[in-house]
Image (cartoon, coloured by chain):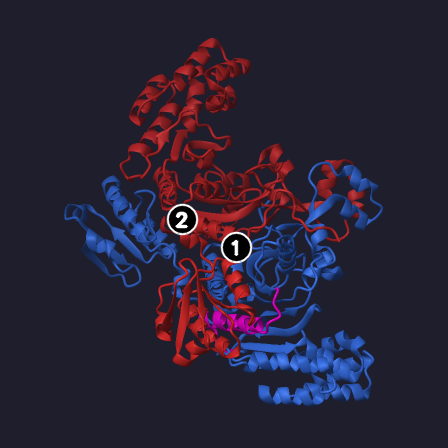
Chain colours: A red, B blue
């Protein structure tokens, strides 16, 4: 008899945690819906041909592949190396993110879809990453994307979704940091080294980690001249209000039409006057976001500085995502919520409301048959009204039943003893206050539990 | 460029379907909650050691196994046969049902749990079955189980959950068929052939498929004598009201104390007078349910006869489930909802309410900047009130915007033309009736969309 366990990097979610997680999911889902986004669900397994090569070599390695069913012995033994072996015995893998399945869905349903298609998707994904604090092998992604529209109104709407959800969750002091890939490209263009775009962005992305000197050092190693680095440092020194930052960017990058386009896009998003934010987005010129497929605005949500958590969400605009599946020229823009991190933030700041932690409200003590029969009819009426009610399963000793109520954190206990039954009354005991009162059955049904 | 697709037996769920499915899930979840059941979620992947051997040979075959990550070439080549190969390169498999992971969870958390533990779980499971109409390789199970209580009140509660959910869903004419494993065992005992219990149950389970003669023939082949079969046919002939059936069972099986116990349990569930059902459960002595681990009451829910669908749910009491993981002597009883089939039934009977099909309520036409700015402020107010609202993403031709509203089945369109803006009014057009009215901004916010 081996002791039972679960796979590395996976989790069981017990009742208390599920309820709190559902509170977050529900808040995000409601917001997506009122913003006109539509739910989509795709299978946990995708064909390998759909996923392979979409996440880089690293991704192919970290994908969980599903073994073909039936006999695989011969196929396996004809394989000459690991690569051949794996492709001989697997043809499916677990969802690695929600974006590629979404693109696959759009291409498969392009003739039925009304474009722009605004979809949201909240499902688990699986990655064979080395498990560590806050990084799991099974975790939920919550994405909202718009495909088939180049309008910057989508960028504004998606930033408003962040603003709305995080405000609804009671978060304060978070930051919506935005930048534009065209500006970063423009910087490389001004320097005359667009081929080093990735090197440059990777380095400046580390500014708050390794500091200005660190960045300078790294840029030198990556083959940039002193003059290049001077320009980059001017870029990094850009500061002030959004208007001031935009002005400085315009001046520094005026020779790049791409940069100017990016600056114009940023200023539209910030100053379009379409929306009023609870927390105004701020420009962060060092923000790069790893994924190279971003081509326009990029955004990252930083948790309140009071909690050491870093990014709790991010996204941006990408061109031609569905081109991977033979449908070119469809632009997309999307955002993602990091639910596990948001959970930890709300937990640390004690922001989960009582309602997110409610379980059974009322326990009817089991005092034998007559009492239980009466309890049942009350119980069914309360349940009809949405009040979660239970009858203890057996006529056990009082303290055993009370212990159950306590362990389950049930706030009210109802006693239907002989005297209560005789007078058609019920005794309601509030376990928090210890107060007990006798009320009529009618009062019980309208009781404010 | 290969045409994108999804694995055999899996499905994408588009917006319309997701909403209808969520309506079913939500109805079931709410009912579970008010009955005092608590949510549990377990990982999609379980260790093979947890799952292997729990579902019979068939189950082990139909399990989706996950390939170990990293180099597997050498392990694979040392394997002498298929079995060795598979166990050398896999250590995880996808969840095959919700019951075994639940048992595993209970054992792992036995010291924290307040018993009886009433849990519900609604998650997908995966089986490599041959796909066919109504049978998928990825499908949801919705289970409610109670462990740690022998009280028959649990059976009553679980039957009430079926009754409540199906009534809430507007279903009529469904049947709650119940039986008790002890009665079937008692029948075999009375015949004196308990070793043939499975053969007997399998045969009589087929009564409505192959008819009385078919059953007789099969019983003969399975080695039962004419006298045995006479008794069995007396058993199958049992008929009338529940009281009458119980009386006839008592008479026929009086020599089996096990049968009498089962009869007593059935009569408690039916006549305890604890609960009032919308649809009273009926005794079906031929009901056996495949799974051999059932030891007490068994239940099966039959869809209304008007739809050819058969069972839309089932369950029963099983003893010692957690014994598999080293925690013996804990009894359990549970039920399961067949959501895919319930979906088809509601679809066929047109029972999905409008609210389960609601998407965006209001589309603001995009008539340029000034109009869009005004639209945004109205839109954000409506969204705050929970009204899903959108602004068309670009100032396109009117008919293009109207076509989008039509394709998305958005019921209301709002026009903010120059005249409206001037007079601080909005024009609301009901696309179903074609009626259009001019109202004030304040009226719009309180409009009954």
The residue shown at (32%, 58%) is: B411
Q: Which residue does the numbered mark 1 point to in the structure image? A: A15
Is label 1 in contact with label 2 (beta carbons under 8 Å)? no
Look at the picture and state if B329 lies above or below A82: below
On the image, the x and y values in percent for residue B82 come to 80, 49
On the image, the x and y values in percent for residue A374 come to 46, 77
Residue B161 painted magenta: yes
Q: How far apart are marks 1 and 2 (CA)?
A: 25 Å
Lateral position of residue B402 relative to residue B59, left or right: left
Q: Which residue does the numbered mark 2 point to in the structure image? A: A32
First in sequence, mark 1 or 2: give its number: 1
- Of the pair B78 and B42, the residue shown nearer to us: B42
On the image, the x and y values in percent for residue B104 come to 65, 55
Q: How crowded is mark 2: few (under 14 residues within 10 Å), some or many (20 or more)?
A: many
- The quarter of the picture where the C terminus of chain B appears is bottom left
The residue shown at (28%, 35%) is: A272
Lateral position of residue B305 relative to residue B230, left or right: left
Residue A301's image quarter?
A: top left
On the image, the x and y values in percent for residue A203 come to 50, 21
Query: Main SS type for the magenta part?
Result: helix
User: What segment is highlighted magenta in the picture?
Assistant: B148-173
Lateral position of residue A342 relative to residue A50, left or right: left
Given the image, what chain letter belongs to the residue carrying mark 2? A
The residue shown at (74%, 51%) is: A2
Residue B67's image quarter?
A: top right
- Of the pair A429 and B406, the residue shown nearer to us: A429
Q: Residues within 10 Å of mark 1 (few under 14, many from 20)?
A: some
Secondary structure under the numbered disc 2 in the rendered image: helix
Q: Residue furthest right?
A: B80
């Amino acid at each position: 008899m081996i002791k039972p366990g679960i796979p590395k990097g996976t989790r069981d979610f017990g009742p208390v945690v599920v309820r709190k997680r559902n509170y977050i999911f529900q808040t995000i889902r409601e917001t997506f819906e009122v913003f006109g986004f539509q739910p989509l669900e795709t299978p946990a397994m995708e064909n390998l041909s759909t996923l392979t090569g979409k996440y880089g070599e690293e991704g192919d390695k970290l994908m969980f592949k599903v073994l073909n069913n039936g006999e695989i012995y011969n196929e396996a033994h004809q394989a000459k190396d690991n690569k051949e072996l794996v492709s001989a015995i697997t043809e499916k893998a677990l969802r690695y993110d929600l974006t590629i399945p979404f693109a696959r869905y759009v291409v498969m349903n392009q003739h039925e879809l009304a474009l722009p298609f605004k979809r949201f998707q909240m499902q688990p994904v699986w990655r064979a990453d080395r498990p560590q604090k806050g990084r799991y092998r099974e975790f939920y992604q919550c994405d909202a994307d718009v495909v088939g529209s180049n309008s910057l109104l989508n960028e504004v709407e998606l930033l408003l979704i962040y603003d709305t959800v995080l405000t609804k969750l009671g978060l304060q002091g978070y930051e919506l940091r935005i930048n534009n890939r065209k500006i970063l490209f423009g910087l490389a263009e001004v320097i005359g080294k667009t081929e080093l775009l990735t090197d440059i962005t990777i380095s400046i992305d580390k500014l708050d980690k390794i500091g200005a000197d660190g960045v300078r050092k790294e840029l030198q190693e990556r083959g940039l001249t002193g003059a290049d680095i001077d320009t980059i440092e001017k870029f990094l020194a850009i500061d002030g209000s959004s208007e001031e930052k935009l002005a400085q960017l315009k001046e520094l990058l005026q020779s790049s039409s791409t940069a100017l386009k990016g600056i114009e896009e940023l200023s539209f998003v910030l100053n379009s006057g379409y929306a009023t934010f609870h927390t105004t987005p701020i420009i962060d010129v060092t923000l790069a976001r790893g994924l190279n497929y971003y081509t326009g605005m990029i955004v990252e949500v930083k948790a309140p500085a009071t909690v050491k958590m870093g990014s709790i969400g991010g996204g941006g605009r990408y061109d031609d995502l569905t081109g991977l599946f033979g449908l070119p020229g469809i632009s997309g823009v999307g955002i993602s919520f990091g639910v596990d991190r948001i959970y930890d933030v709300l937990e640390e700041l004690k922001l989960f409301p009582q309602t997110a932690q409610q379980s059974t409200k009322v326990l009817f003590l089991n005092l034998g048959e007559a009492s239980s029969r009466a309890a049942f009819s009350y119980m069914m009426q309360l349940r009809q009204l949405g009040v979660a009610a239970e009858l203890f399963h057996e006529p056990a000793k009082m303290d055993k039943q009370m212990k159950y109520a306590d362990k389950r954190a049930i706030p009210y206990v109802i006693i239907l003893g002989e005297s209560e039954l005789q007078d058609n009354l019920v005794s309601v005991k509030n376990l928090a206050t210890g107060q007990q009162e006798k009320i009529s059955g009618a009062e019980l049904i309208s009781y404010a539990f």
